[in-house]
Amino acid sequence: MSGSLADFGTMEWMLIAVAFVSATLSGISGAGGGTILIGAIYAAGMPPIVAVPLHASVQMVSNASRVVAYLPHVRWSAALVFGLGALPAPFVVAPLVSMVNPDYVRLLMAGFILWTLLPRASRAVTLSDRVAMGTAGVLNGGVGAVVGATGLLIGPFFLRPTWRKETTIGTLALCQSLGHAFKLTAFATIGFQVLDQAWLMAGMTVGVIAGTALGRGLHHFVQEKAFRPLFKGVLVLLAVKLLWDAGRRLLGA
Protein backbone atom coordinates (compact mmCIF):
# COMPACT_ATOMS: atom_id res chain seq x y z
CA MET A 1 0.00 0.00 0.00
CA SER A 2 1.19 3.50 -0.79
CA GLY A 3 3.21 5.71 1.50
CA SER A 4 2.92 8.87 -0.63
CA LEU A 5 1.01 10.29 -3.57
CA ALA A 6 3.90 9.40 -5.87
CA ASP A 7 3.41 5.73 -4.98
CA PHE A 8 -0.29 5.65 -5.84
CA GLY A 9 -1.32 2.99 -8.32
CA THR A 10 -4.57 2.12 -10.05
CA MET A 11 -6.19 0.66 -6.92
CA GLU A 12 -5.50 3.72 -4.77
CA TRP A 13 -6.94 6.14 -7.32
CA MET A 14 -9.89 3.81 -7.86
CA LEU A 15 -10.65 3.79 -4.12
CA ILE A 16 -10.52 7.60 -4.02
CA ALA A 17 -12.94 7.69 -6.97
CA VAL A 18 -15.24 5.19 -5.26
CA ALA A 19 -15.13 7.28 -2.07
CA PHE A 20 -16.25 10.29 -4.11
CA VAL A 21 -19.02 8.41 -5.96
CA SER A 22 -20.34 6.63 -2.84
CA ALA A 23 -20.47 9.91 -0.93
CA THR A 24 -22.31 11.56 -3.82
CA LEU A 25 -24.91 8.78 -3.80
CA SER A 26 -25.18 9.05 -0.03
CA GLY A 27 -25.59 12.82 -0.28
CA ILE A 28 -28.48 12.33 -2.68
CA SER A 29 -30.21 9.52 -0.79
CA GLY A 30 -29.19 10.37 2.78
CA ALA A 31 -27.75 6.92 3.55
CA GLY A 32 -25.93 3.90 2.19
CA GLY A 33 -22.69 5.48 0.99
CA GLY A 34 -20.64 3.77 3.68
CA THR A 35 -21.95 0.36 2.65
CA ILE A 36 -20.96 0.97 -0.98
CA LEU A 37 -17.52 2.17 0.10
CA ILE A 38 -16.67 -0.79 2.37
CA GLY A 39 -18.04 -3.18 -0.26
CA ALA A 40 -15.72 -1.63 -2.85
CA ILE A 41 -12.73 -1.80 -0.49
CA TYR A 42 -13.35 -5.51 0.09
CA ALA A 43 -13.94 -6.04 -3.63
CA ALA A 44 -10.54 -4.44 -4.32
CA GLY A 45 -9.00 -7.37 -2.47
CA MET A 46 -8.03 -5.74 0.80
CA PRO A 47 -8.02 -8.00 3.88
CA PRO A 48 -10.31 -7.09 6.80
CA ILE A 49 -7.40 -5.91 8.96
CA VAL A 50 -6.87 -3.10 6.41
CA ALA A 51 -10.36 -2.68 4.94
CA VAL A 52 -12.28 -2.04 8.17
CA PRO A 53 -9.94 0.55 9.76
CA LEU A 54 -9.34 2.30 6.41
CA HIS A 55 -13.08 2.64 5.95
CA ALA A 56 -13.47 3.71 9.59
CA SER A 57 -10.91 6.51 9.28
CA VAL A 58 -12.59 7.98 6.21
CA GLN A 59 -16.15 7.68 7.53
CA MET A 60 -15.14 9.08 10.92
CA VAL A 61 -14.17 12.37 9.28
CA SER A 62 -17.30 12.37 7.13
CA ASN A 63 -19.57 11.86 10.14
CA ALA A 64 -17.63 14.39 12.22
CA SER A 65 -18.40 17.06 9.62
CA ARG A 66 -22.11 16.35 10.08
CA VAL A 67 -21.71 16.55 13.86
CA VAL A 68 -20.31 20.06 13.49
CA ALA A 69 -23.19 21.06 11.20
CA TYR A 70 -25.86 19.75 13.61
CA LEU A 71 -24.03 20.28 16.91
CA PRO A 72 -26.83 22.23 18.68
CA HIS A 73 -29.23 19.34 18.07
CA VAL A 74 -27.04 16.45 19.31
CA ARG A 75 -28.37 14.35 22.21
CA TRP A 76 -25.19 13.82 24.23
CA SER A 77 -26.81 11.49 26.74
CA ALA A 78 -27.92 9.19 23.91
CA ALA A 79 -24.40 9.21 22.46
CA LEU A 80 -22.97 8.27 25.86
CA VAL A 81 -25.22 5.21 26.13
CA PHE A 82 -24.38 4.27 22.54
CA GLY A 83 -20.65 4.61 23.23
CA LEU A 84 -20.82 2.37 26.29
CA GLY A 85 -22.54 -0.29 24.18
CA ALA A 86 -20.17 0.07 21.21
CA LEU A 87 -16.82 0.25 23.02
CA PRO A 88 -16.04 -3.35 24.11
CA ALA A 89 -16.96 -5.37 21.00
CA PRO A 90 -14.36 -4.12 18.46
CA PHE A 91 -11.50 -5.06 20.78
CA VAL A 92 -12.94 -8.60 21.05
CA VAL A 93 -13.98 -9.04 17.41
CA ALA A 94 -11.01 -7.41 15.61
CA PRO A 95 -8.45 -10.10 16.64
CA LEU A 96 -10.88 -12.82 15.54
CA VAL A 97 -11.50 -11.15 12.17
CA SER A 98 -7.76 -10.87 11.54
CA MET A 99 -7.42 -14.66 11.88
CA VAL A 100 -10.31 -15.60 9.58
CA ASN A 101 -9.86 -16.34 5.87
CA PRO A 102 -10.65 -12.97 4.18
CA ASP A 103 -12.83 -14.73 1.62
CA TYR A 104 -15.24 -15.83 4.36
CA VAL A 105 -15.48 -12.21 5.44
CA ARG A 106 -16.19 -11.21 1.83
CA LEU A 107 -19.03 -13.75 1.72
CA LEU A 108 -20.41 -12.29 4.95
CA MET A 109 -20.08 -8.78 3.54
CA ALA A 110 -21.97 -9.81 0.38
CA GLY A 111 -24.74 -11.33 2.49
CA PHE A 112 -24.93 -8.19 4.63
CA ILE A 113 -25.24 -5.96 1.55
CA LEU A 114 -28.06 -8.08 0.13
CA TRP A 115 -29.78 -8.14 3.55
CA THR A 116 -29.85 -4.33 3.64
CA LEU A 117 -31.86 -4.37 0.41
CA LEU A 118 -34.66 -6.52 1.83
CA PRO A 119 -37.90 -4.78 2.86
CA ARG A 120 -38.38 -5.13 6.58
CA ALA A 121 -40.42 -3.53 9.34
CA SER A 122 -38.44 -2.16 12.26
CA ARG A 123 -39.58 -2.37 15.86
CA ALA A 124 -36.67 -0.21 17.02
CA VAL A 125 -38.86 2.86 17.29
CA THR A 126 -40.96 1.18 20.01
CA LEU A 127 -37.97 0.75 22.35
CA SER A 128 -37.10 3.29 25.02
CA ASP A 129 -34.37 5.75 24.06
CA ARG A 130 -31.83 4.17 26.43
CA VAL A 131 -32.49 0.59 25.28
CA ALA A 132 -32.48 1.67 21.62
CA MET A 133 -29.14 3.49 21.94
CA GLY A 134 -27.53 0.65 23.90
CA THR A 135 -28.70 -1.94 21.36
CA ALA A 136 -27.51 0.19 18.45
CA GLY A 137 -24.13 0.56 20.14
CA VAL A 138 -23.67 -3.18 20.63
CA LEU A 139 -24.65 -3.86 17.00
CA ASN A 140 -22.34 -1.14 15.74
CA GLY A 141 -19.39 -2.42 17.76
CA GLY A 142 -19.84 -6.10 17.00
CA VAL A 143 -21.14 -6.16 13.43
CA GLY A 144 -19.19 -3.06 12.42
CA ALA A 145 -15.86 -4.67 13.27
CA VAL A 146 -16.58 -7.20 10.50
CA VAL A 147 -18.59 -5.41 7.83
CA GLY A 148 -17.42 -1.86 8.56
CA ALA A 149 -20.60 0.03 7.66
CA THR A 150 -23.62 -0.25 9.95
CA GLY A 151 -25.61 2.87 9.10
CA LEU A 152 -28.40 0.94 7.37
CA LEU A 153 -28.50 -1.50 10.29
CA ILE A 154 -28.64 0.91 13.22
CA GLY A 155 -30.38 3.85 11.54
CA PRO A 156 -33.90 2.78 12.61
CA PHE A 157 -32.87 2.96 16.28
CA PHE A 158 -32.38 6.72 15.86
CA LEU A 159 -35.88 7.39 14.55
CA ARG A 160 -37.14 8.41 17.97
CA PRO A 161 -40.75 9.68 18.17
CA THR A 162 -39.73 12.80 20.12
CA TRP A 163 -36.65 13.68 18.01
CA ARG A 164 -36.62 16.19 15.19
CA LYS A 165 -34.85 15.32 11.94
CA GLU A 166 -31.85 17.46 12.90
CA THR A 167 -31.52 15.62 16.22
CA THR A 168 -31.55 12.25 14.47
CA ILE A 169 -28.94 13.30 11.90
CA GLY A 170 -26.60 14.94 14.42
CA THR A 171 -26.83 12.24 17.08
CA LEU A 172 -26.44 9.41 14.56
CA ALA A 173 -23.39 11.15 13.08
CA LEU A 174 -21.78 11.53 16.51
CA CYS A 175 -22.47 7.88 17.39
CA GLN A 176 -21.11 6.69 14.06
CA SER A 177 -17.97 8.79 14.64
CA LEU A 178 -17.50 7.15 18.04
CA GLY A 179 -18.00 3.68 16.56
CA HIS A 180 -15.45 4.31 13.82
CA ALA A 181 -12.95 5.66 16.35
CA PHE A 182 -13.33 2.52 18.46
CA LYS A 183 -12.81 0.28 15.41
CA LEU A 184 -9.77 2.23 14.25
CA THR A 185 -8.23 1.96 17.71
CA ALA A 186 -9.04 -1.75 18.02
CA PHE A 187 -7.42 -2.61 14.68
CA ALA A 188 -4.41 -0.42 15.48
CA THR A 189 -3.78 -2.56 18.56
CA ILE A 190 -3.49 -5.69 16.39
CA GLY A 191 -1.19 -4.31 13.74
CA PHE A 192 -2.94 -1.80 11.46
CA GLN A 193 -0.36 0.90 10.69
CA VAL A 194 -2.31 4.17 10.52
CA LEU A 195 0.61 6.28 9.26
CA ASP A 196 1.33 3.84 6.42
CA GLN A 197 -2.13 4.58 5.02
CA ALA A 198 -2.16 8.33 5.75
CA TRP A 199 -2.03 9.52 2.12
CA LEU A 200 -4.72 7.11 0.99
CA MET A 201 -6.89 8.07 3.97
CA ALA A 202 -6.42 11.75 3.12
CA GLY A 203 -7.29 11.21 -0.54
CA MET A 204 -10.40 9.18 0.24
CA THR A 205 -11.47 11.70 2.89
CA VAL A 206 -11.23 14.55 0.37
CA GLY A 207 -13.25 12.41 -2.04
CA VAL A 208 -15.94 11.79 0.58
CA ILE A 209 -16.21 15.47 1.55
CA ALA A 210 -16.40 16.59 -2.10
CA GLY A 211 -18.89 13.84 -2.97
CA THR A 212 -21.13 14.67 -0.02
CA ALA A 213 -21.23 18.33 -1.05
CA LEU A 214 -22.06 17.40 -4.66
CA GLY A 215 -24.73 14.93 -3.55
CA ARG A 216 -26.45 17.50 -1.38
CA GLY A 217 -26.42 19.91 -4.30
CA LEU A 218 -27.94 17.31 -6.63
CA HIS A 219 -30.49 16.09 -4.11
CA HIS A 220 -33.31 18.32 -5.36
CA PHE A 221 -32.66 17.57 -9.04
CA VAL A 222 -32.72 13.76 -8.89
CA GLN A 223 -36.08 12.02 -8.85
CA GLU A 224 -36.50 9.39 -6.15
CA LYS A 225 -38.09 6.86 -8.51
CA ALA A 226 -35.13 7.04 -10.88
CA PHE A 227 -32.44 7.07 -8.22
CA ARG A 228 -33.48 4.18 -5.97
CA PRO A 229 -33.09 1.40 -8.61
CA LEU A 230 -29.65 2.77 -9.55
CA PHE A 231 -28.52 2.87 -5.93
CA LYS A 232 -29.73 -0.66 -5.25
CA GLY A 233 -28.18 -1.85 -8.50
CA VAL A 234 -24.75 -0.63 -7.41
CA LEU A 235 -25.10 -2.54 -4.13
CA VAL A 236 -26.18 -5.72 -5.92
CA LEU A 237 -23.21 -5.51 -8.32
CA LEU A 238 -20.84 -5.13 -5.38
CA ALA A 239 -22.38 -8.14 -3.63
CA VAL A 240 -22.11 -10.26 -6.78
CA LYS A 241 -18.46 -9.22 -7.22
CA LEU A 242 -17.68 -10.22 -3.62
CA LEU A 243 -19.50 -13.54 -3.99
CA TRP A 244 -17.71 -14.31 -7.27
CA ASP A 245 -14.23 -13.46 -5.99
CA ALA A 246 -14.62 -15.29 -2.69
CA GLY A 247 -16.37 -18.31 -4.19
CA ARG A 248 -13.77 -18.71 -6.94
CA ARG A 249 -10.89 -18.71 -4.47
CA LEU A 250 -12.61 -20.94 -1.92
CA LEU A 251 -13.53 -23.48 -4.58
CA GLY A 252 -10.01 -23.40 -5.98
CA ALA A 253 -11.02 -22.30 -9.44
Image: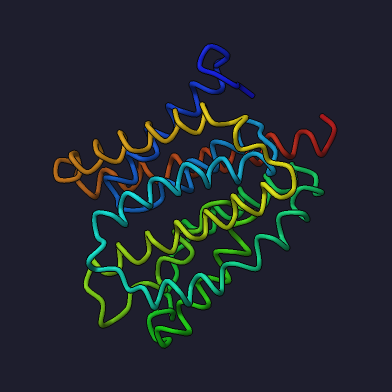
Residue drawn at x 45%, y 69% is: 120
Q: Is residue 46 above or below residue 190?
A: above
In which quadrant will I find the N terminus? top right
Q: Position of residue 160 (x, y in %)?
A: 32, 78
Q: Position of residue 145 (x, y in %)?
A: 63, 56
Residue drawn at x 30%, y 62% is: 169
Residue drawn at x 50%, y 29% is: 15
The answer to which image quadrant residue 171 occupies is: bottom left
Please tell me which residue lies in front, 203 or 156.
203
In which quadrant will I find the C terminus? top right
Q: Position of residue 225 (x, y in %)?
A: 24, 49
Q: Is residue 253 above or below residue 79?
A: above
Q: Of all residues shown, which one is farthest toward the left?
A: 220
- Image position of 146 (left or right of 168): right
Q: Position of residue 228 (x, y in %)?
A: 32, 48
- Image position of 251 (left or right of 38): right
The answer to which image quadrant residue 132 occupies is: bottom left
The answer to which image quadrant residue 70 occupies is: bottom left
